[in-house]
Amino acid sequence: MTEKEQFISEILALVKQPLAGSNPITPTEEQIALLQASKDTADAMQVARNLGWTDYLVEWSLNKPVDEQENLQNALTLALQGDTSNYIGVDAATVINRGGEVTTIGAYGENFYVNGDQNVFEEFTPEEIREIQANLINAGLLGSKVNRPFRPGVWGKYDKEAMYDLMSQANENGEGKAERGWQTLMQVYLDNPIPEPTKVQAYLPPDYKAVSNSVKNLFEAELGRKPKPYELKLLANTYLTEAQAAYQQDVDFAQQPTDIMATAGELENYGNHIQPVVEPGVTDIDPSARMKDVFDRVTQKEQERLGTNRDIQATNRIILNSITGAPR
């Protein structure tokens, strides 16, 4: 058992026992998860202080052997003083209005979110995490629309970023754990969705010369000859036509309704891809692949005669790279 684990075990056992003038405490799963998420013993002591267990921290230190108390003194002093830079989005001197009283975050330090609180959800069940993720998506804080991909039922990097944002704003508003700060703020987002503006980029057609050169390279690589004029025109026009159709398809996707609500049981439909997902029944338009199909049709007999053995994916990649100027 590590030093941190031993401290957590001992402090949890201690708070369940009544001290003079106080009642015993039954730690919640969230409080235990907070302690377990701490990076070391000193950090765990700070978490215990933020939970309002200061008297138990002192009692715990007094129960340690005399030769250990000197080594514990610095860590205990820091924990009891509090880390004024550890609050999410604010510091201890931040002025707030709490219950009509003008005060500071530090005066009620144990009530407000500290760095690490956004990680406690790692200990939640997959079902509980999915519920929170669905709300974060609907609040516009998670998912492909805000470039924060996620794994349904797993609390990851971007889930933590979204929750950090909520907890930071809750602290700034003076609404901490007693006021269900992040939950209250989440509901505000859900009740007041922000309309998402449609972003459509202007269509920039591929350079005809680059497309023509790609067609020539394709014929030379596959058949060892230059294309005939009608072949060059056919394949180049095919690519240009399909490129414009692909652009229009992207525009159509961008203009689809965005007010569909995420649900915990269907998160796989919402979010791990930054680019739009092509819906079932809709063909994803690939200009390079379409041009290659036309090439195969008009040169089928010639290819059979030459017995050409091609890597289709590699060929498509060469076509696209030669047009866009990307490295081969």
Image: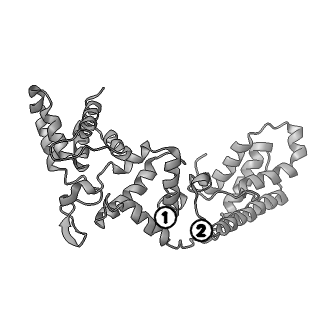
Q: Are marks 2 and 1 in contact (CB under 8 Å)?
A: no
Regarding mark 2 in the picture, which secondary structure is present there? Answer: loop
Question: Residue drawn 69% across and 43% down?
Answer: 314
Q: Is residue 231 above or below residue 315?
A: below
- Sequence order check: which comes first, mark 2 or mark 1? 1
In the rendered view, does 328 fall on the left or right side of 26?
right
Amino acid carrying label 1: it is Ala
Residue depth check, mark 2 versus mark 1: number of the one nearer the observer: 1
Q: Which residue does the numbered mark 1 point to in the structure image?
A: 139
The picture places residue 163, in percent across and down from the top left corner, at 40, 56
Q: Residues under labels 2 and 1: Cα distance?
A: 12 Å
Question: Residue drawn 41% across and 54% down?
Answer: 161
Question: Residue drawn 53% across and 71% down?
Answer: 196
Residue toward you, 55 or 215: 55
Q: How is the image coloured?
A: one colour
Q: Quadrant of residue 93?
A: bottom left
Residue toward you, 319 or 312: 312
Amino acid carrying label 2: it is Thr
Residue toward you, 59 or 93: 59
Instruction: Mark yes or no: residue 96 visible.
Output: yes
Q: Quadrant of residue 301?
A: top right
Q: Which residue does the numbered mark 2 point to in the structure image?
A: 258
In the rendered view, does 139 fall on the left or right side of 289?
left
In the rendered view, does 159 fall on the left or right side of 51?
right
In the rendered view, does 136 fall on the left or right side of 285?
left
The picture places residue 135, in percent across and down from the top left corner, at 50, 59
The picture places residue 279, in percent across and down from the top left corner, at 70, 58
